[in-house]
Image (cartoon, rainbow, N blue to C red):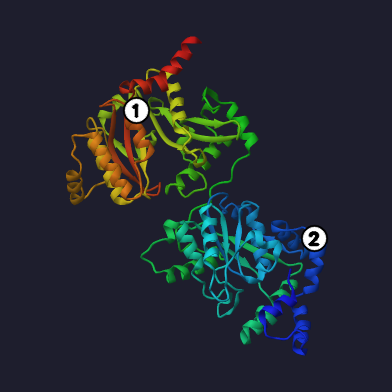
Amino acid sequence: MISTEQFLLKQFPALPIASKRHKLLKFVFKRLLHEKEFIDFAQRYPLLSGFDFVEKALEYFEFKIATTDSEIEHIPVTGRVVIIANHPIGSLDAFALLHTIRKLRPDVKVVANELLMSVPPLQDILLPVNNLTGNTLKRDLKNIHQFLDDEGALIIFPAGEVSRVTPQGIRDRAWEKGFLTFAERAKAPILPIHIQARNSLTFYATSLFYKPLASLLLVKEMFKHNHTCIKLSIGKSIPYTSYGDSKIANTLKIKLLQKQLYRVAKRKESLFKTESAIAHPVNRVELKKSIEHCEQLGTTNDGKQIYLYQSEQPSIILKELGRLREFTFRSVGEGTGNKRDLDPFDHQYMHLILWDPEDLEIVGAYRFSPIQRLMKGSDSSGLYTDKLFNYQDEMLPYFEKGIELGRSFVQPRYWGKRSLDYLWQGIGAFLAQNPQYRYLLGPVTLSAALPQRAQAFLVYFYQLYFPAQGDLAYGRDSYQLSEELEDELWRFFSADDYAKDFAKLKTMLANMGVSVPTLYKQYTELCEHGGVQFVDFNIDPDFSNCIDGLVIVDVKYLKAKKRARYIDVHQRTLEKE
């Protein structure tokens, strides 16, 4: 805890302990630092540490926190995030923020100054920096970077000190750049939280004349906040794509972000494009009950279960599907920016769900529907893909025997575990039960986070080797290659050796730090030559300006091994029944 002796030794190392001046300073600082109260607290609660210590301290001061449930939902429940806040009190406001964030993020830590680092029970939830000299150790900076790389929630008070009197009221001084450096390096969203509180007039008057003395008064100010309440205004997250523009100088970004924080308190329009925090997970027990009422299509070798779900009403299953979609798509630079990725089509389509009965988790899902269920004669407006592509009359035969697929995802924790293959087994089970369907069609996304040259190479390659077999459809905002780039790509690919050109494509993408998207590889590996078409590519403004390729798969052309794996195995089961 706080020790006056240690404080004096650190601040006045040359001052003799036996001197009258030392004794006088000791007498004064014992009262300024409330050493007795800290000792009494430590003796009453000797084993408290971390968040338990924070909670007990807030309880000791009877310090209340006011915020709204709707704003609490702005706090991301998973994933890296840099939380920035003003620092009006310089003490208990940090505890209040930690306490609030920790309810949803047990992994939260706060960047701390030397005063808090001198409190041993807090050290496990702090990441130290040197605010006074700016000479933060490389080891400490590395720890902060690693914490964000590990998907932690990091609280930073960018001013590095308590708010002071300004012509605009009680405000932070100009912010330091550290918070922006941490956020940009991790490409983490920034969550602004405004804290409404203030210290005493004595503190602010002292600040005007002698700031060091005012800093020493902070502990005394903390005790003045006994039986008080502060208000937290929690804004929406600012994604990296919104604040990370390299064309804007960091000094201007910092000023805008500081201004944005104070706008949050006044409910003013955001200076940055924001996105809602992803919705909180639904109750696992209720989800399990709902899933088990669905039709089960099969079970995988490792115990995952494949279900078929459809409902015209809002449900707990749809809520969780929408949450996981948004979480998964955002992790690869996509997403709607809403708390859940849901649309009216979700009530009209069926959903193929891969369920983990041990962890009570939806592993992944595919949204699909026989197309004739959605058509009104030759009117295709009931299809999801109709809002992306302008269909031509030559598509009608595909519609008659087709299934539209889309919105597929596997949540990140199950990546690399054959989960997408299991979803295809579910599709195969449906096809085995409904052999009248021959075509699978739907949008396959290229993330807007891909380098533009990578997007161009992928679009050109897949239209080169898997072209449309007729006048079928055109993107409503069709992706267009410039003549110069198209000429470059024409010279780059031989156009007569798929394996050689695919190897060149992979090498080119690897040089850009990316790879061929999984679904593009999977769709094209399903069929023999002639079984896959990439009809056109469209830019989707409602989905982070991603590029959607309209793919058509002719099940008649499935490779023998793929047919055996995905369809025949289910047909044999049906025959036994």
Task: Judge from the rendering whether residue 276 lies leftward or rightward of residue 63; answer left or right.
Answer: left
Say which amino acid is labelled 1: Leu
Q: Residue furthest top?
A: 576
- Image: 348 above or below 488: above
Instruction: Please name the residue shown 42% across and 69% down the image.
Output: 250
Q: Quadrant of the N terminus?
A: bottom right
Instruction: Please name the residue shown 70% across and 79% down the image.
Output: 9
Say which amino acid is labelled 2: Tyr
Local secondary structure at mark 1: helix
Task: Judge from the rendering whether residue 401 lies leftward or rightward of residue 163; answer left or right.
Answer: left
Task: Looking at the image, tell me whether mark 1 or mark 2 is earlier in sequence order.
Answer: 2
Percent from the top left, x then y, of residue 299? 53, 24
- Image: 188 above or below 266: above
The answer to which quarter of the image holds residue 21 is bottom right
Give the Cα distance between marks 1 and 2.
64 Å
Residue 315 visible in image: no
The answer to which quarter of the image holds residue 232 is bottom right
Q: 198 or 209, which is in the foreground?
A: 209
Instruction: Please name the residue shown 63% across and 87% down the image.
Output: 209
- Image: 10 above or below 247: below
Label number found at residue 45: 2
Local secondary structure at mark 2: loop
Task: Judge from the rendering whether residue 138 lies leftward or rightward of residue 12; answer left or right.
Answer: left
Q: Residues within 10 Å of mark 2 (few under 14, many from 20)?
A: few
Residue position for label 1: 526
Q: Nearer the viewer, mark 1 or mark 2?
A: 2
Label number found at residue 416: none
Percent from the top left, x then y, of residue 344? 46, 38
Percent from the top left, x then y, of residue 139? 54, 63
